[in-house]
Image (cartoon, rainbow, N blue to C red):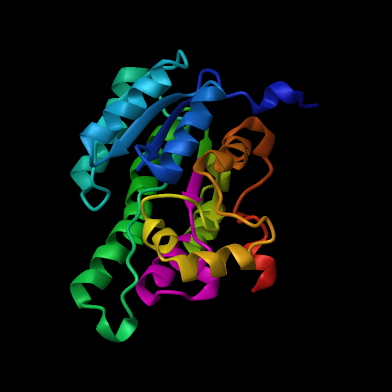
Amino acid sequence: MHSMQGFGLTGKVAIVTGGNGGIGRGIAIGLAEAGSDIVIAARNEEKTAGVIEEIKRLNRRCLGVRCDVRNRDDIKSAVDKALQEFGGLNILVNNAGVADGVAPQSTAEEEWDRVIDTNLKGTFRFCQAAHPALVKTGGGKIVNIGSQCASSAMVAHYAASKGGVLQLTRSLALAWANDNIQVNAIIPGWFRTDLTSPVIESEPFYRSVVRRTPAGRFGEPSELAGVAILLTSGMSDFITGQSIVVDGGYSLMM
């Protein structure tokens, strides 16, 4: 029988890619509040430094590692530093991603490659690099960040990358079940982040999103912490290969 203590993450170590802003920051702080020590793997070291201070004020250990998820050496370094500094790895949150709104007929091949390489291949690379460390600690949790665009088919290259993330999540959940690694995905709807700021600044588009969302607003990144804590805690030991939508009801109107 589980008690509410099953949601606690004390003694756990989590890597959050892109954890220095937006959704990643909201999840990283939420995991720290639940007791986890955090490794922020991201490119912008100045932004990372600010989140490190926030997490340390929660009396949790936090390490920042400069990391581009398109670079295998960066990924290996992030995992190695987590092991060296904290002695193990229990949780991986694959949040780092890029997007733009270019129409498919105008998308350059280089831009297609950048989005796929970051969002899909970057997620796979990090999962692959973290797998031995998770196995060594007796299992663990992987949470991949998808997007409602994967089902709504907005923006071809971004939708393709996030659709791939959801299928990758299912495949890894099946492949690594015997390793006691649960792999799940969170599908955010419209949240206030740097990536969505152009939408928010475009009042007609912003108002159309809000009208279509039963909650009547955009989400705040901190509102993803609850589902992230669930999927990284012992309370989700029998949940794997699933994609949980957090969108204020937006998908109900599609």
- The residue shown at (69%, 67%) is 252
Residue toward you, 199 or 62:
199
Residue at point 36%, 48% (across, down):
128
Q: Position of residue 69 (x, y in %)?
A: 27, 49
Tell me the residue at 37%/53% (across/down).
Answer: 123
The mark tally for this picture is 0
Q: Where in the figure is residue 242, as x and y percent of width and height?
A: 62, 55
Magenta span: 142-165
Q: Looking at this rendering, what residue extends furthest in the top direction?
A: 59
Residue at point 58%, 41% (across, down): 223
Whether residue 73 sits left or right of residue 24 in the image: it is left
**Residue 77 appears in the picture as rendered:** no
Q: Nearer the viewer, residue 99 or 201?
A: 201
Locate the N terminus and report the quarter of the image it occupies: top right
- Regarding residue 157, the answer to whether it shows in the image is yes
Q: Position of residue 33 (x, y in %)?
A: 54, 23
In this rendering, the answer to whether 149 lies above or below 98 is: below
